[in-house]
Image (cartoon, coloured by chain):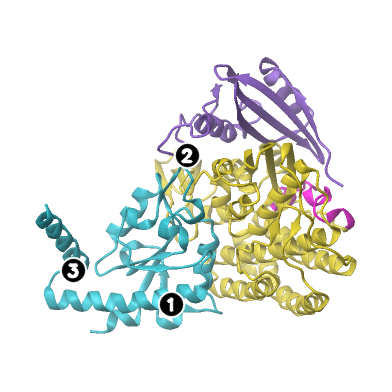
Amino acid sequence: MAKLKKSPWIIHYDGSSCNGCDIEVLACLTPLYDVERFGVINTGNPKHADILLITGGINAQNKKVVEQIYQQMPEPKVVVAVGICAYNGGIFKECYNILGGVDKVIPVDIYVPGCAARPESIIDGVVQAVDLLEMKQDYFEKNGISYNKAMKNKNESNKENES
Amino acid sequence: MREEYKIIELQPERLVDTAMRLKRDLYRLVQICAVRIESGYELTYSFAKEYEFLNYRLVINEDVVVTSISGVFETAFLYENEMKDLFGVNIDLINLDYKGNLYRIEKPTPYKE
Amino acid sequence: MGNRSIVPFGPQHPVLPEPIHLDLVVEDEKVVEAIPSIGFIHRGLEHIVKKKDFNDYVYVAERVCGICSFMHGMSYCEAVERVMDVDIPERAKYLRTIWCEMSRIHSHMLWLGLLADAFGFESLFYQCWRMREKILDMFEMSTGGRVIFSVNKVGGVLRDMDHEMLSNFIKQFDDMEKDIIELTNVFLEDYTVNTRLRDVGILTKEQGLELGVVGPMMRASGIAFDTRKLKYAAYEWIDVEPVVATEGDCYARTYVRIKEIFQAFDIIRQAVKQIPDGEIAIKAKGMPNGEAFVRVEQPRGEAIYYVKGNGTKFLDRFRVRTPTFANIPSLLETTKGAQLADVPILILTIDPCISCTER
């Protein structure tokens, strides 16, 4: 089953970024960089999406929105954090309204470096995300449980064992 | 060479009057800015008419209540909510008062310290 | 009276790359009122001016917004230079002007693309962004960055453009201009595009003055005002006249922005002709003590910067009032009475930059 790999759909959400990464994400979809050649389509609906591209850090107001989008996406799903702000808040780390990187609220699979992230590295992130998506799909078919859920369970049982 | 502009000191109770006069003279509201100073706040109301740039400055204590000019300049409501939320300036009678919800931040009035 | 209901618009919406949220009160298909709620991208970056050295803060100021990043950095520097009473070399002023106008071209091309996308003309969107890439290549060649350049510093600029590079740019602009004329004629003359833009979201001159609109939106309502007529960067030596349209509808706003692209090409040509040789930066001595306002014309309109220093390396206050912030009230006004399906276009024609607005 390699169907998913042929056409992963992307949803993009702007956390609290400066727009720099966002226009680069959009630039990836336009003719010069053209991620559509990998079958990638940008969608606005989280329920259609396989990959969540998220830029910028998390603040008090968008925390819930990010969680909601993530939960609405069907399994398997991959989260790509684009840019340094999505990793830990970047240059805005000291701001009073920045809680930190995206991984404070949802599990992140791939980090794309840069401020602003270059289209080449975003594409690289997406290509890696596609492979990961495939891996998660295989895992689901083999074990009958989604990869994210299995990892979550494993972490929880580890914690219990420790305590 | 640089742009020239004026900063005029103003008493808080004359604010609405002045705003009304400026409105009559077809000035537009450019911005309102608050600065935290030791004894309270320094508010700057900027107006412009064509290329002229006028600033009115209010220096107030923390507990002074400033009357909103949003009844005169409708657009002031955004700036005034911002000052109220971020600085904790007491502004009365804003025509659309977000009551601290313009920016939903965890820590109220972060600029007040 | 039809049924009233509230339709939430955003924050995550396919048309917009950025989150903005409006609560639209609709009566059947007609919008009666729009209530904005902002703050999804509020970071509080004005606050960290107290924690960062004023020389380092340039890089934060640049990241107020990634689209007009150059202008934010430049205006912050201008404000600090004004406080410190530093007069930067003329060559630096001209270089700043050239980069400013290149930013304007890139921003307007980006906006045209998004507008095309909003009315469902996807190939036009792609064409606009394809041409915009050429400007980004030039930015990369001259500054090293595509969207965030970091070439400003207090006292001048960090990189120079040599004569060869400048004349190369001018040559490329000639080619680009031809392509852009062809492209923008679609916006101005195509029947389908016209039906989507004409007589939609009219803002009269009186309303415009009342609501304090700025930038292309103001000029599209017949108010001839352009902050570039004021003295900052090298604009005092450059011939620039505001582009004005009188209709005040979405078409007029598109028209103004398109003409401004060509105006920007013209300004760059003038600047390249006049640019003197010499230093690109001087050392700014001392610490900023005092205050200053600076007004500049960004692609989206007039922006105000305020800087207050206290004689130490940390500033007391940095404030930026961005054009979108000033244009939100007029957006609310134009949505009243509009059809629900037109709302994305109305939002786009103010050219919203949410990350500027919320800082």
Mark 1 vs mark 3, foreground winner is 1
Nearest to viewer (mark 2 / mark 1): 1
Q: Please state if C41 lies on the left or on the right of A62 as rendered.
A: right
Circle 2: element type: loop
Colour assignment, chain C? yellow
Q: Name the residue under label 3.
A: A146
What is the distance, in whole Å, between disc 3 and disc 2 at their CAs? 37 Å
**Which chain hosts label 2?**
B
Judge the density around disc 3: few (<14), some (14-19), many (≥20) Cα neighbours within 10 Å: some
What amino acid type is highlighted by mark number 3? Ser
Which residue is denoted by mark 2 in the rendering?
A: B103
Q: Report if residue C227 is visible in the image.
A: yes
Mark 1 belongs to which subunit? A
List x then y, in percent, for residue C84: 77, 43
**SS category of the residue bearing label 1:** helix
Q: Which residues are drawn in magenta?
A: C216-237
Who's purple, chain-wise? B
Q: Which image quadrant is residue C172 in?
A: bottom right
Q: Give, as a three-letter code, the residue at label 1.
A: Asp
Asked whether residue C221 is drawn in magenta, I would say yes
Q: Is residue C226 visible?
A: no
Tell me, by letter, which chain the rendering colours cyan. A
- Relative image position of residue B10 (x, y in whole percent): 73, 20
Asked whether disc 3 touches disc 2, contact meaning CB atoms under 8 Å apart, the reply is no
Res. A10 image quadrant: bottom left
Q: Which residue corresponds to mark 1?
A: A124
Which residue sits furthest left? A161
Look at the picture and state if B91 lies above or below C147.
above
